[in-house]
Amino acid sequence: MRFAFSAKPNPNVDASMQSNRKLLLTEQQRDSMRAAGKFNASLMDYLRPFILPGISTEEIDTIVYDYTIRHGHTPATLGYLSYKKSCCTSVNNVICHGIPSSYRLKAGDIINVDITSIVDGWHGDQSESFLVGECSVEACAITQAAFDCMYRAIRALTPGCFVSVIGDNVVMEAHRRNYSVVREYVGHGLGKRFHQYPNIPHVPDRKARQERLYPGLAFTVEPMINAGTRFTKLDSRDNWTVTTRDGRLSAQFEHTVLMTENGPEILTLTQNGPQYGHQFGHQFSLPT
Ligand code: MF3
Ligand code: CO
Ligand code: CO
């Protein structure tokens, strides 16, 4: 059976976790991650009202930079590898790692803004896809799908469950809508480092069926959902921007999650953003 669950810990799992034992956070370290997630979420709440037709993605980046610095923290992407901006802005057919530019949002666009902060040495990482002005049914549907995929995966997690629970749930939710799931870019563990053990694929692979999410582990769930095929294309000029190969829409949501003894705890929950169960598409209808 494809989704059969084995209650017996696989000895290989303990091997890969064994060499990563220090990634299982103490209560004090968990509080540091909670603070980082909370700050990152406050930045998302601050930013959300600015995402309107006419703003450029560079202006979005400046808002992210200024808010982060003003609060004494650091944008994690700034100077990460060769990346020179404080967030990623991925519009329409851009899957992820869109670089802020002079492009101005127009009504009907969808944009994912992905923000990551370093707070006292610890990382918080999240993204939301936004519908800009009034959107097509398709734009609304792909945004809804990415949101529902993320929440279905997070809510299926239990202490010590396999990493593959995430991929299994994302794939089921995406495929029942005839959407595809990106494989080349994955979620990740995070803590003192931006990207660390374990890899969190949104389509289950062999490794994900062996590795477990133990209490004390912090990681992201960030499915990228495509309206057409799953295939991607990396921009050969900037070496960052990832687009759909077929040019169709892609959407994504991301939260940082801490596994605890009582189940998953979302560290990047916002005050004003879409919560579990949110329905996109009606936010512009006026009361009659
Ligand atoms: N925030 C992204 C993630 O979710 C990573 C962006 S790395 C960058 O992992 F260099 F492209 F900014
Ligand atoms: Co991110
Ligand atoms: Co991430």
Image: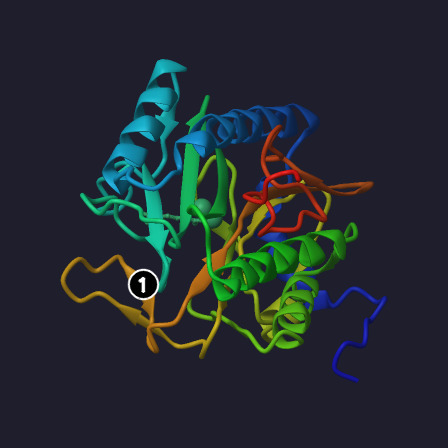
The residue depicted at 25 percent of the width and 40 percent of the height is 56
The kind of residue tagged 1 is Val
Residue 109, x across and y down, in percent = 38, 54
Residue 125, x across and y down, in percent = 49, 40
Vertical comparison of 67 with 86: above or below: above
How was the colour assigned to the protein in this rendering? rainbow
Report the front residue among 12 and 76: 76
Q: Which residue is mark 1?
A: 242
Report the front residue among 16 and 7: 7
Q: In this orientation, does residue 195 appear?
A: no
Tell me the quadrant of the picture where the N terminus can be found: bottom right
Tell me the quadrant of the picture where the C terminus can be found: top right
Q: In this orientation, does residue 133 appear?
A: yes
Residue 140, x across and y down, in percent = 53, 58
**Residue 20 relative to residue 92: left or right:** right
Q: Number of marks in the image? A: 1
Vertical comparison of 274 with 146: above or below: above
Q: Secondary structure at mark 1?
A: strand
